[in-house]
Amino acid sequence: MKKAGIVGGLGPESTVDYYQTFIAKYQDKLNSKQVLPELFINSINMYNIFACISENRLNDLTEYVGEAVQKLEAIGADFIVISANTPHIVFEEVSQLTKVPMISIVEATYEKAAEQGLKKVGLLGTKFTMEHDFFKKPFLENGKEIVVPSEQDQLFLHEKIVEELENGIVNPETKQSFLAIIQKMIAEEHIDSLILGCTELPMILKEGDVDLALLNTTEIHLDKMLEQVFL
């Protein structure tokens, strides 16, 4: 079986989710609780990621994430994922720094949206994911609409993701505010689906919370990882 390499710590809560869910999916695939996948996790500092993007130091960001990827390659990872959406702003540059395959959470999510025939997709995430074009690019290039909340709502979402979800805090009041933002997007933009474009968002938003197709980027990414293990 191929060994996965995970660049984690982006943040810690979702890294735990990646680890536990990957094991569960692997065991389900083999229909046995007596098996475990072999994998590597290199946990880095998400606050360094945020600082690099805020200060427009994308070369530094590429170098920082690239070093994490190269360490995973050096210890034997057969393929690598970055367990967060935001650092994918430099995914193409980082993927040039390793000889092993990397699985993009953005491309995997676009493929899932295309598979489901979705046309107008809402995107939630950190302010970096919502305001930059890296996540929107494959959708727009293939004739799909992708929309984000208002600038004020983006700032609110980012604050709650960083201050609460990244620290394992799930606040019912925050959830209601998130749902109000989503309802506004449905009413004003007529979206047919919603991307949970931060790997912590599934902590607070679940299937059934809204009457929309939810694209859980963590789940989608993990399914692609599992495919790669068994190639």
Image: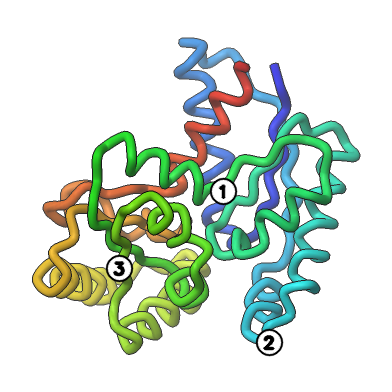
The residue labelled by disc 3 is 147
Using residue 31 as the reference point, say whether residue 53 is left or right of it: right
Identify which amino acid the numbered label 1 is placed on. Val
The residue labelled by disc 2 is 55
Image mark for residue 196: none
Which residue is painted at 23% across and 51% down in the image?
A: 119
In this rendering, which labeled residue sits more in front, label 3 or label 1?
3
Q: Quadrant of residue 55?
A: bottom right
The residue labelled by disc 1 is 16
Q: Where 2 sits versus 146, above or below?
A: above
Rounded to the nearest whole Å, what is the CA distance between mark 3 and mark 2?
25 Å
Residue 66 at what x, y percent from top left?
Answer: 80, 57
User: What's the image's color scheme?
Assistant: rainbow
Which residue is painted at 55% across and 27% down in the image?
A: 226
Residue 146 at what x, y percent from top left?
Answer: 32, 62
> Upstream in the sequence, badge 3 or badge 1?
1
Which residue is painted at 83% across and 38% down in the image?
A: 99
Using residue 99 as the reference point, say whether residue 149 is left or right of it: left
Q: Quadrant of the C terminus?
A: top right
Residue at disc 1, secondary structure: helix
Residue 220 at what x, y percent from top left?
Answer: 44, 40
Identify which amino acid the numbered label 2 is placed on. Glu
Residue at disc 3, secondary structure: strand
Q: Badge 1 local density, few (<14 within 10 Å), some, or many (20+)?
A: few
> Upstream in the sequence, badge 2 or badge 1?
1
> Upstream in the sequence, badge 3 or badge 2?
2
